[in-house]
Amino acid sequence: MTATKGLEGIVATTSSISSIVDGVLTYRGYNIDDLAVNADFEEVAYLLWFGKLPDKEQLQELRNQLSEYAAIPDEIVTQLKLYPKNLSTMAALRSAVSSLALYDPEADDMSRESNVTKTVKLQAQLPTIVAAIARIREGLEPIAPKKGISIAENFLYQLTGKDPEETAIKAFNQALVLHADHELNASTFAARVTVATLSDIYSGITSAIGALKGPLHGGANEAVAKTLEEIGGLDQVDSYIQAKLDNREKIMGFGHRVYKNGDPRAKHLHKMSRELGEMNGDTTLFDMSVRIEGIVTGQKGLKPNVDFYSASVYTQLGIKRDLFTPIFAVSRVSGWTAHILEQYENNRLIRPRAEYTGPMDQKYVSPELR
Ligand SMILES: CC(=O)SCCNC(=O)CCNC(=O)[C@H](O)C(C)(C)COP(=O)(O)OP(=O)(O)OC[C@H]1O[C@@H](n2cnc3c(N)ncnc32)[C@H](O)[C@@H]1OP(=O)(O)O
Ligand SMILES: O=C([O-])CC(=O)C(=O)O
């Protein structure tokens, strides 16, 4: 038995949800480039869950269900109010989502019908939880979700209590579409491993949130924003990045396990970042990002991944840095739940082997003689 570090190149399951072939990302056979510019996030979620784009009535029905389920139990709001104000937003999200199971009488109902209902509920409730975390830790009351508006609009509304601009809704919707699914990434794999024991969907999503939090995965978008803040301005980019590279430190938002010639999602976020800067009359963050890319790609051949330009996009939308990874979860819960449903449909326990490298032939001696 020989271990493959990080399971690189190992095909661990079959899936018909998303594919990455020759650097092209598709959801259920639709190129991400097509969906990113044309689709609403709700359509994409439906596509991931049910394998086809919804017709008008199906889409309306989904929108109605999302509106109906978007409010979170009062007990969750009470719990969020007990969390420390200087909380880790991802730890708060992970805890709150885990607690949702306590207030859902169907949490352990393993029928497909119930799991589909819980899928839609989780998609509806995650944005409400993230917005509530954001407000409560600032000492503000959470804002109830509005009925009849999109997830993108509702989330931005619930953060501030103000109706967001059309351009912000459009940009945010596109970011949600781009982050929705990504084959067997670490958090999706974590979700699938958890539910493959026939544990419940809330356990699967809780595992996934834990895996997404790390800076080598979803946490990288916050790390990129931190880098931009630390650099402070265009003139400091070269010296800052060069020092990191000379120190053999990683530049967050670059590199990818699967894409070696570039992440197809990055160009959309690059464009969005530029457009938001031009609209706000200040392209500093975008210009800094482009300069960082020039150095890192030029010297290391590493290309930006989805997390790199999303950092300047969210910052320019006026969103606080520690909400970036929770926002990733707001989108990716669509993919996680699609994978969980697929895992349940054709389940087998996921249990690989380890190549043992420790000592052998040890003999027990009692503590007094050690
Ligand atoms: C949504 C997402 O999860 S996208 C990924 C988000 N994560 C990041 O942006 C964090 C920064 N990037 C990384 O850490 C990595 O590129 C990963 C984790 C994404 C992929 O990791 P792996 O496939 O395991 O590649 P690994 O970390 O082994 O890197 C291979 C080589 O490239 C270098 N490298 C990889 N990424 C970077 C980077 N961002 N900056 C500098 N060097 C890098 C490594 O140091 C290593 O060099 P070495 O062979 O000289 O030791
Ligand atoms: O696929 C991966 O390893 C990470 C990634 O880009 C994602 O989850 O979107």
Image: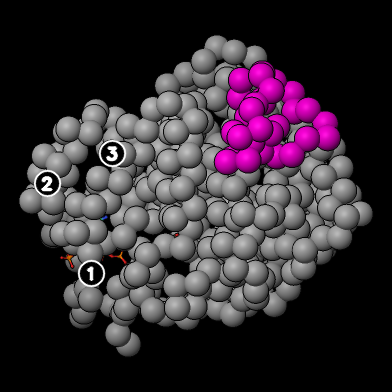
Give whichever of 91, 157 is nearer the camera. Answer: 157
Q: Is 186 placed above or below 140 here?
A: below
Task: Give the residue displayed 61% in from the left and 35% down from the top.
Answer: 167
Which residue bears the numbered disc 2? 242
Task: Give the residue displayed 69% in from the left and 54% down from the top.
Answer: 39
The crowd level at tag 3 (other Cα within 10 Å; few <14, some 14-19, many 20+) is many
The number of callouts visible is 3
Does label 3 or label 2 sit earlier along the sequence?
Answer: 2
Colour setting: one colour
Task: Give the residue displayed 68% in from the left and 50% down from the top.
Answer: 41
Label 2 residue near ligand 1, CB within 8 Å? no
Q: What span is colored magenta in the figure?
A: 143-172
Please indicate whether residue 192 sits to the left or right of residue 253 in the image.
right
Which residue bears the numbered disc 1? 364
Does label 3 or label 1 sit earlier along the sequence?
Answer: 3
Q: Which one is closest to the eye, mark 1 or mark 2?
A: 2
Real-space Cα distance between discs 3 and 2? Answer: 14 Å
Q: Which one is closest to the eye, mark 3 or mark 2?
A: 3
Q: Give residue 196's position: percent from left, percent from top.
A: 61, 68
Label 3 residue near ligand 1, CB within 8 Å? no
Q: Secondary structure at mark 1?
A: loop
Which residue bears the numbered disc 3? 288
Real-space Cα distance between discs 1 and 2? Answer: 53 Å
Does the rendering let one see residue 11? yes
Please indicate whether residue 274 sits to the left or right of residue 94 in the image.
left
Give amino acid for label 1: Tyr
Give amino acid for label 2: Gln
